[in-house]
Image (tube, rainbow, N blue to C red):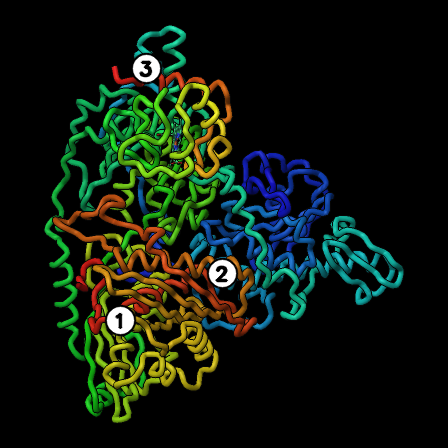
Amino acid sequence: MKTLRSLACLAPILLAACGADPAPGPVEQIIVREAGAKTAAPAPAAATGDAAGALIAEGKAAFANCSACHAVAKDAPNGAGPNLFAIVDQPAGQVAGFAYSDALKASGITWTAAELDGFIADPSAKIPGTTMITGAIADAATRQAVIAYLESITAN
Amino acid sequence: MSKTETGSPGKMGKWTRRAFIGAGVVAGSALVVGVAVRPGNPIDRLSPMLADGKDEQLLNAWVKVDADNIVTAVIPHVEMGQGVYTALAQMLADEMDADWNKVQILEAPADKQYVSDSIGRDFLFPDLEVPALFEPTVAGGILELAQAMGLQFTGGSYSVRATGQRAMRTAGAAAREMLVAAAASEWQVPAGEITTADSMILHAGSGKAEPFSKFALAAAEQSLPAKPTLKSPENYKIMGQSKARHDIPGKVDGSAIFGIDANVPGMKYAAVKAAPVVGATVESMDATTARTMPGVLQILNMGDFVAVVADGYWQAQQALNSIDTKYSKTEGDSLDQEALFARYATHLDEAGENGGDVETEEGDVGKGFAEAVTKVEAEYKVPFLAHATMEPMNCTAWVRDGKCDVWSGHQAPVNARQAAADAAGLAFEDVTYHNAFLGGGFGRRSESDNIIMATRIAKATGYPVKMIWSREEDTAQDHYRPSATSRFQGGLDKDGKAVSWSNIHTHLFDPKDAPTVPYYNIASHKIRKVDVPTQLRFGPWRSVDHSQHGFFIESFVDEMAHAAGKDGYAFRRELLAGSPRHLKVLDTAAKMSGWGSALPERHGRGIAFVPSFGSIVAQVAEVDMSGPKPKVTKVYVAADPGFVINPDGFTAQMESAIVYGLTAALYGEISIKNGEVQQSNFHDYPMLRINEMPEVEVALINGDHKRLGGGGEPGLPPIAPAVTNAIFAATGTRVRELPLSKHSFA
């Protein structure tokens, strides 16, 4: 260990100056698959494979926009936003243990697909004063997919 | 080549291979001025790299003017959040009288021509005063040295004070003089009647006005100004202004490209795990599970680390986690934290009164201490620290057909290129190094371990591979700020005046002046060090040795003040008597803070004063100790870097240094057990949270426009001692060991 180096002699510079380090190749190299080769076909994302299943699968993927703040598993803790388990057709602002904004609590909205669509498109326009300040989805088709996904998460 | 205009900054200009190949069509002759270009004629190589259209003429190494009258500043430094692109461009544009709204910025390629000889000079011969900027022998000699070491380095708070002050300004002024000379000869008027403003050349008498671009070609034929005249501060138009940062819009809209964003067609991903004890090797790896996991392409035992290459990063990391690895035994296996500090103590004990290496000595400390009326002694300790850059360490490499391309964000791109060449077993010329923004550097990205690892993996696979370290790997495999122990003896005379100062500490890394106190007027002082071996790798960490010694020195000064029965501010004033520039900084911070005014119960104020990297900084911290842990409520900063080029940018550096330094003071600790680093991620290596951030007020002082100081680091050293001195004021408890999370103040 060199303990005495001036900035002018930082390790990489020393290395550059001496070019001393030989670069050892692998001691052991296990090639599982060539880079170009196809991997075993993964199970389709949605087991159903029909159009509805595909839409739900697309929505699940698009929910990545939301999952930083929202959990969807039953009884999972609230994050930055409330748990959205079985949220469709529920009244707004009712998830236990979440500190909602006054605006959302007073909104009187029931989360039908249409109301969700408006909210996700532009939360602050739909409910001025909401604390959901990011996460909007501009693309209507993607919103439909997310809503289909939320609809698929029900109590039964 | 993508470009940015100040008016509509989007993507930052970066060097691409295409630009290089586009070289063939360069037209016109070219001229080089500036101290960082070797006497001789590098222009044949440089101009094709800089110009991508036939309308462009290379004006000098740091600037080009194209047919649209756009001035491009070529910046030989990397952007890691410190705002260097903007500050350096300001220096060039101001001297040139360029229109700031038409200035573009391009990062210099990782080419040895761009090593900054002004940095070389400051590193190698810090005391050398070179009156004329064009001193062929000195400059040429330094350039060669700097090239030999591959210095195209961003660090040491050097960019503005060295490259900016000596190269960018000179280049701008020279370019301007040549443009004026060209216009004078065409217009047949004396050069002295010509003025310049906003990238225009003007002649009041005849009413002529033409853009710079009109004379770019002719300017290249003018003789090189031997010593271009630099502006004096009253004529600065762009320097000293808070110009908007060039790099920020791209960072806000997401278009900025960092090293980790490298995207190469056909690229695969690698996750890596190095032996947890430095120096150990992989004895065996059981990859039975990993080879069946999705996406896995290759599993590599590289001797000193294991790598999994897969279609995606997550797949690679998951497979890596499943591998059971056994490592060789090393001498370091038994090392742990307590033993290490015990080892420091033994070495310090052995050095005794006169051992160790003397760093500075003046007067007779032995006598001074013996005759002192009051004697003060103390020992301080600080731990290892990791850098924890927000962007994890990464590098993308592609080795094929005797060539190698490497993508990363590095503080010393030329070194990175050399490191890749060595790792690939290729010549420097066969490696193209693509540098991108650094998502935090702090010294971590001056090391090339990531470059070497990625290149070795890519060499083994033959296809492009992006290696990304997990946060755990980043925390456990850093090049750490050294832990250290420092012991002091101080003597006071009957009036409570400091008369002797003796210090011995472990390790000395850089800069050499970090443990010294030449600015404090103390009759005798002696400073020594002992080197103590440890197997951990050391690396520069924002403000380097000043980060430890700032805490040691300013804590001890406070202890001496207390022993003298004096207020910490008043005591430092006495020590600085006769240095008006230093005093002004100290006084400014004290005044801003309302020093001496009453504070609530269990609140306290602490002051600290540390000149470093050419800048003088004083800070006053206010703490609230009424709760279970220290809360820093307010920090007042006074800083004199000579002249502030971009006040907003400099202020941001002071603030961010406080975030970084306060994180370390409150929580920062890398500890070792059985030779391994115990911390792994942000739960056990926490960062300062937004609710813990004190309000920061910064006052800037332009004390000497001829000698600039740095901005990136000098804000850091005073924060820890300012806080611990404030804790002492609030509670009477003296903190002699960091971090503060080790202590209970209940």
Amino acid of disc 2:
Phe
Q: Compared to B380, does B18 lie above or below?
A: above
Q: Nearer the viewer, mark 3 or mark 1?
A: 1
Whole-percent x and y of residue B632? 32, 62
Q: Which amino acid, mark 3?
A: Thr
Q: Is residue B729 left or right of residue B252?
A: left
Secondary element at image label 3: loop
Left/right placement of residue A33 relative to residue B51 reads: left
Badge 2, how many Cα within 10 Å: few under 14, some, many 20+?
Answer: many
Out of A92 and B549, give the one closest to the viewer: A92
Q: Which mark is residue B103?
A: none
> Do callouts 3 and 1 point to residues on the same chain?
no
Residues beneath discs 1 and 2 located on the same chain: yes
Residue B509 visible, this orientation: yes
B146 shown above or below A79: below
Towards the viewer: B230 or B224: B230
Q: Residue furthest right?
A: B206
Structural crowding at the residue carrying mark 1, measured as other residues with C-alpha within 10 Å and reported as few (<14), some (14–19) or many (≥20): few
Relative to B429, say whether B94 is above or below: below
Corner quadrant of residue B349: bottom left
- Is label 1 or label 2 in front? 1
Tell me the tag on residue B601. 1
Tell me the residue that label 3 is attached to. A39
Label 2 sits on a secondary structure element that is helix
Q: Residues under labels 1 and 2: Cα distance?
A: 34 Å
